[in-house]
Image (tube, rainbow, N blue to C red):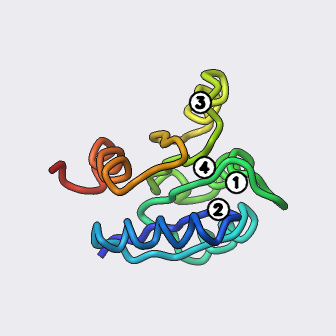
Amino acid sequence: MKTCLVVDDSRVIRKVARRILEDLSFHVEEAGDGSEALTFCRSTMPDAILLDWNMPIMNGLDFLKNLRADPGGDRPVVVFCTTENDISAIAQAMECGANEYIMKPFDSEIVQSKFAEVGLVLPT
């Protein structure tokens, strides 16, 4: 079973994402900010990361830069999930190593579609 780490400072978003991802047969772990997520990844690297941009302590972009610099940090598929819709912000996230981008609010259809695009699930 593939593991997905959901990184978001909103408990509600993490709960919604967990439900969607478990329906897609993922084992789900959660982190409330980038620092917590980095600590998790350094002990157990997940297959996928659903990553919020705006968080306290360490934001999503700083987390992604640190992750990609770590040994094995190039392996997880990272899907940004945020309200940031500026084209330059999206480009910056992709340049730092994001594989795909989802806008909030999201639903199971959007998550499944984006995860299929990056090869994490089979297309429907």
Name which residue type carries label 1. Phe
Residue 22: x percent and y percent?
35, 74
- The residue under the point 55% across, 33% down is 94
Instruction: Find disc 2 in the rendering and name its residue.
Output: 8
**Label 2 crowd bin: few (<14), some (14–19), many (20+), radius 10 Å:** many
Q: Is residue 102 above or below residue 32?
A: above
> Is tag 2's residue or tag 4's residue first in the polypeptide sequence?
2
The answer to whether residue 3 is left or right of residue 70 is: left
Between the C-alphas of marks 2 and 3, the distance is 18 Å
Instruction: Say which of marks 4 and 1 sits in front.
Output: 1
Q: Is residue 116 above or below residue 88?
A: below
Between the C-alphas of marks 1 and 2, the distance is 12 Å
Instruction: Find disc 1 in the rendering and name its residue.
Output: 63
Name which residue type carries label 4. Arg
Checking the image for residue 20, the label placed there is none
Instruction: Say which of marks 3 and 1 sits in front.
Output: 3
Q: Quadrant of residue 43?
A: bottom right
Instruction: Find disc 3 in the rendering and name its residue.
Output: 90
The answer to whether residue 102 is left or right of residue 59 is: left
- Element assignment for label 1: helix
Nearer to me, 116 or 86: 86
**Label 4 crowd bin: few (<14), some (14–19), many (20+), radius 10 Å:** some
Name which residue type carries label 3. Ile
